[in-house]
Amino acid sequence: MLPDGWRQCRMGDLFGSRRERGRPGLPLLSVTMNDGLVDREDLDRKQDSALAPEEHLLVKPGDIAYNMMRMWQGAFGLAHKEGLVSPAYVVLQPKQHTFPGYFARLFRTRAMLHRFWSYSHGLTDDRLRLYFDDFAAIRVHVPSWADQCRAAEILGCWDDAVAVATRLSEVKAMELALVRETLVASALSYAKAPLSDLAEVRTGLAKGKAAGGDAVAVPYLRVANVQDGRLDLKDVKYIEVPTHQVSRYALQAGDVLMTEGGDADKLGRGTVWKGEIDPCLHQNHVFAVRARRELVMPGYIAALAASEYGRSYFLACAKRSTNLASINSTQLKAFPVPLAPLPLQSMLESTIDTALNAVRAADHVATRLSIERESIANRLFTGRLGYGRTSVASEASA
């Protein structure tokens, strides 16, 4: 049963296909998956068009343009000005009682992206295309025009809040990088020793080996769990290992987790393990550096590895191919560590930890706002949440 004021219709009842030719003097626009419709000249990848303006499609404010091959991945954008787009795009022209700001947000939901995928045609995912006629056949439940406007206004406020929180997180990350580089630079003048003289470099568990009859399932960390200066523990996998091997590969609080590579930006990145899960193992693509604390502090090692000094070392000795890079345990053991006095290391570790906590706090706020925004969006798009200010405020504070 539909909520009051809602109706079921097809997308073709809400949008037409604008096929107007472009004209000279208008900016070239491109669809992106993350930023919607943007000026082509602002893209990192420059795309010079050999087509004349008249060979492009015209897009007007309020239109939604989408890439037929990537609509199911979110490659669409709401136009805020007139411009020219590729003739391979579809330009959706909103009909009467269709508020485009509402649908630009509805189209980002997982349910709608899945529906776009199911209505696309092609032998494989990289060949799927969502033609306008197929888009027009999609059935949706739609509130009144007034409620569409109100929902878009509500979600626009949430989008602004998420954007501010995300920007704050980025600023805190830049502050952390500046603090880390400044403090690491103060330690580089000291004599250096290879990491193997100061810590034990432990390799992880290789996946795929037969566990045997006395196996036990234990959580283990993958490269995806180890980020730059933090851990992402939302998706921790389990692995079966012989019981007697659990202690061999188990992490200890204070271990510095470092990745062997992958993409160049993942090379040597890591953080200090604080015993968040016990027991927990680590994959062979994640090193655990166990410091001899009478000589070196774990946070000091992590800071060195994450600094420009550490990145330069790892990139210089890494095995590289195309966009990938990796280091092995021998290269990690040879990492030259400046032998700064322990009090200086401790001060550096404490100062960077304070900056890291600020980044984590900002990340937490941004994540929490994003989760709440998605929850409210799902309720607005299904009619389970009213459109008045009181009902939305009550939901957010629940």
Image: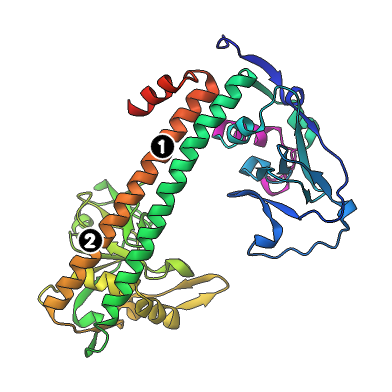
Q: Residue at x 20, y 56 (%)?
A: 274
Quadrant containing the C terminus in the rendered view: top left
Q: Which residue is mark 1?
A: 371
User: How many labels sit on residues?
Assistant: 2
- Magenta portion: prevailing SS class: helix
Quadrant in the rendering for residue 179 = bottom left
> For residue 114: magenta?
yes
User: Disc 1 on helix, strand or loop?
Assistant: helix
Q: How is the image coloured?
A: rainbow
Is residue 272 in view? no
Q: Which residues are magenta?
A: 110-130
Mark 1 closeness class: few <14, some 14–19, many ≥20 residues within 10 Å: few
> For residue 31: magenta?
no
Quadrant containing the N terminus in the rendered view: top right
Is residue 86 in view? yes
Q: Is 182 above or below relative to 143?
A: below
Q: Amino acid at mark 1?
A: Ile
Q: Residue at x 55, y 70 (%)?
A: 323
Question: Residue 357 in the image: x percent, y percent?
Answer: 26, 56
